[in-house]
Image: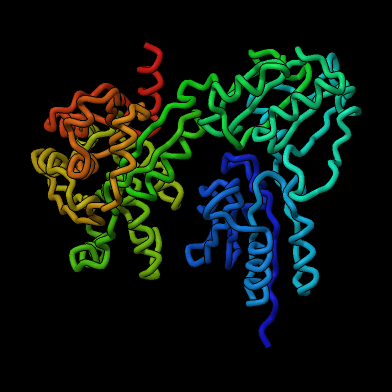
Amino acid sequence: MMKKGFVYLVGAGPGRADLITVRGAEVLKTADCVIYDKLANPALLHYARRDAEIVHVPKRIGKGSCTQDEINHVLVEKALGGKTVVRLKGGDPCMFGRVAEELAVLIEAGVGFEIVPGVTAAVAASSYTGILMTDREYSSQVTFITGREAAGKDQSNIDWSVLAKFAGTIVFYMGIGTLESIAQRLIENGKPADTPVAIIANATLPAQRVLRSILERVSDECKERKIEPPALVVIGEAANSDARFDWFMKKPLFGKHIVMTRDAIGNAAFAEKIVTRGGNPISFPTIRIESLTNSNEFLQALTKFHRYDWIVFTSGNGVAIFFEALKDLGKDARVFGSAKVAAIGSKTAAKLASFGVTADFVPDVFTGRELGRQLIRSTNVHGKKILLLRSQIASNELVDVLVGGGADVDNVALYTATASKDDPSYLVEAIRKGTIDYVTFASPSSVDEFFERISADLVKASKVKVTSIGPVTSERLEQFGIVVHVTASEHTLDGLLDAIEEYGVI
């Protein structure tokens, strides 16, 4: 007899993926099936297992949306199939989330469940705009109201006469579509027409927008500014909160659209850094990283590790692939023996450290040429056996420098980068429309593949600012006739973002 599954109804939070609770992330990692709606950030699927079934159930008005009955059916079907199911619900499951209907069908089917709270939109919007819902000076109470009641109801549950007299902060969820009616009813019931109102759209995300107005004008101004859901309506003195409290929209990269051109996994890691600085990351993978650790060349080198004086890693990708290969072969860091380890930069060294290996040498300037030069200056490499573990398509600069210093160098490919064939049409259109602020490049190979699919002339004619992680990548861009607006002085992703920030304030 097949055992019944279990359902976790998880609050996905207000929008930004890292605002999910620890418990929510934990159960996501265990799920056999993840069912998520339009308000749950797809980036949360990063927490899910690679083999998890992913079911999208958009609950918006119009074509392609799912009804609540359809969602209920999927929930029960997956759980009765023996699966551990996570139902991701935007914000908090119990705040205008129709969770009672989903609980009812689970109980009727005899399926166990757990409700995992989430950060609800109003609380997050307050924190990310500085529009404080409560304050001892102007509001000791706050009320949450739905702007969209159940379809077909004969009578509203909202007592507009009481609400109009409410002295605290009024927050409407899902109120953009009925904003004109909301304002009209409040004014008709005695709310002053000049009552402050704030509209907060896309709270916690780089696309966040805030409109401050008054009750009698807010609907028209909202239409003029083309503010669309998801958005909250905040009514009362809270809407006049000190604008200096708005820390998020003052971030140096806030609202900037930044294209990432690494591999898909690398873009995901880079996106987290961009979001932290308030930017809007746009993933356009140009390459795919393919391991070459099954090659005879690598396996033979591994048997000779004890003969090498130095092992050199030139990227975090290489480190990760190397240790994954060791794990598959039933080996660990003991293969290094007495060999010393060099890393091209601080991030590669940090990746080594995550596997319990401390780099013996890291250059001050993070390029292959400088790694070779500085290693020669710091130690005698003449006659020393050095193993380079790196990309198959890396330049020969490092090899040439070390051989020139008298070293005996073995250059072994750990991985290679092949072309990623994602459809470029969405990015081409965005560049034409002028909605892209920066395109970032982290390697010459990503430059080659980007301009294989995107016209260099299109980029030249646009307002896009082209940015590079270092001089080698910049040289490749210049070969395409591209003006490089920003080159990072520290050749890391953080260094690149630092350089973009500095460029933006010049």
Judged left or right of residue 101, residue 33 is: left
Quadrant in which residue 491 is drawn: top left
Q: Which residue: 68% across, 28% down?
A: 127
Q: Vertically, is 388 above or below 499?
A: below
Residue 195 at what x, y percent from top left? 77, 15
Image quarter where the N terminus lies is bottom right
Foreground pick, 57 / 333: 57
Foreground pick, 113 / 99: 99
Q: Which residue: 35% across, 17% down?
A: 503
Residue 220 at what x, y percent from top left? 62, 21
Residue 78 visible within the image: yes
Foreground pick, 126 / 277: 126
Residue 197 at what x, y percent from top left? 71, 20
Q: Which residue: 79% across, 35% down?
A: 144
Q: Which residue: 29% across, 23% down?
A: 463
Image quarter where the C terminus lies is top left
Quadrant in which residue 134 is drawn: top right
Tell how many labels: 0
Foreground pick, 504 / 299: 504
Q: How is the image coloured?
A: rainbow
Residue 494 at what x, y percent from top left? 40, 31
Residue 124 visible within the image: no
Quadrant in which residue 190 is drawn: top right
Q: Vertically, is 312 above or below 370?
A: below
Q: Vertically, is 388 above or below 296?
A: above
